[in-house]
Image (cartoon, rainbow, N blue to C red):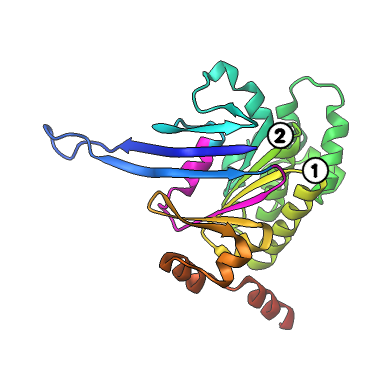
Amino acid sequence: MISVTDLERTYRRPRTSLTGPRPEVHALRGVSFDIEKGQRFGIVGESGSGKSTLVRLLAALDRPTSGSISLQGRRIDNLPERRLGFLRSQVQIVFQDPMGSLDPRMRVRDIISEPLGRQPGRRERVRELLDAVGLPADSGERYPHQFSGGQRQRISLARALAPRPSILLADEAVSALDVLVRKQILDLIAELVERYELTLVFVSHDLGVVRRVCDTVAVMRAGEIVELGAVDEVYDDPRHPYTRELIAAAPNLAAALAGLEEE
């Protein structure tokens, strides 16, 4: 489904002097992995580890400095912009901040149907998706600011599903939500992945969250994958010291939910 080989991404910072060279930042270094159809693949790491850069490359929102990305056996990293139309429908992304990605001037029905263009059956598709993400049908007449953060993330998921993608990328999609809403959105993502037979790439700084929705995890540090394997094995028997640090630092979602239920 997805094959990533020796991926590198280097950026140049502004000059620190009038005559000196622009310093390089290596956001990704030699990243390689394969994702099978239907797999739920987690990418975990702290801020600056390169995980969001990787997601942008997978969505063809940026280009690698070197290496390759293939989707269903077809290279996408070197395609010209005019030939990326098929990718836009096959790969959809949900970001951390839905208010930053939902046009506040548009009604929800228009936000969700926008990826469909002039396709027939748009109204029916919007109603189906609102129901799938747990929002009432009349939500389509309202605007993003009239919803809570969790509800806006549901709208983002509905819009991502509108063109019937095969791959869903979720970049820190629950990190801005409180504990209870986070669990609800995680459960919803798992349900949608199964219902629509999606391949999921889920990015988070929290390995405990990744464990809840993914079957495989890649742990990233400083632009490199330092550990890769089945999520339960990595969580229960981490091999790399950095993975152990992430586990120790991660809040316990199950314990937090249990505490809420006791209140």
User: Mark 1 against mark 2, which lies toward the viewer?
Assistant: 1
**Measured from the top left, where is residue 117 in percent x and y?**
74, 22
Q: Quadrant of residue 141?
A: top right
Which numbered disc covers residue 111?
Answer: 2
Residue 87 falls in image quadrant: top right
Amino acid found under the numbered disc labelled 2: Ile
Q: Which amino acid lies under the numbered mark 1 shown in the image of this protein?
A: Tyr
Q: Is residue 45 magenta?
A: yes
Relative side of 58 to 39, left or right: left
Q: Position of residue 86 (x, y in %)?
A: 66, 24
Q: Which mark is residue 196?
A: 1
Q: Is residue 43 magenta?
A: yes
Q: Earlier in the sequence, mark 1 or mark 2?
A: 2
Crowding at dot 2, Cα within 10 Å, few <14 / some 14-19 / many 20+, comes out as many
The quadrant of the rendering that contains the C terminus is: bottom right
Above-or-below relation of 70 to 181: above
Q: Which residues are magenta?
A: 37-57
Q: Is residue 124 above or below residue 252?
A: above
Q: Nearer the viewer, residue 232 or 21?
A: 232
Give the residue at x 50% y 28%: 77
Disc 1 packing (10 Å; few <14; some 14–19; many ≥20): few
The residues bearing labels 1 and 2 have C-alpha atoms spaced at a distance of 20 Å
Residue under the image location 67 percent in, 42 percent down: 168
Q: Position of residue 120 (x, y in %)?
A: 85, 22
Horizontal and vertical percent for residue 236? 58, 72
**Going by the image, does 175 lie left or right of 45?**
right
Image quadrant in which you'd find residue 240: bottom left
Q: Is residue 160 left or right of residue 217?
A: right
Q: Is residue 137 found left or right of 35 in the rendered image?
A: right
Tell me the residue at 82%/47% (across/down): 195
- Residue, x 61% and y 62% (percent of image)? 231
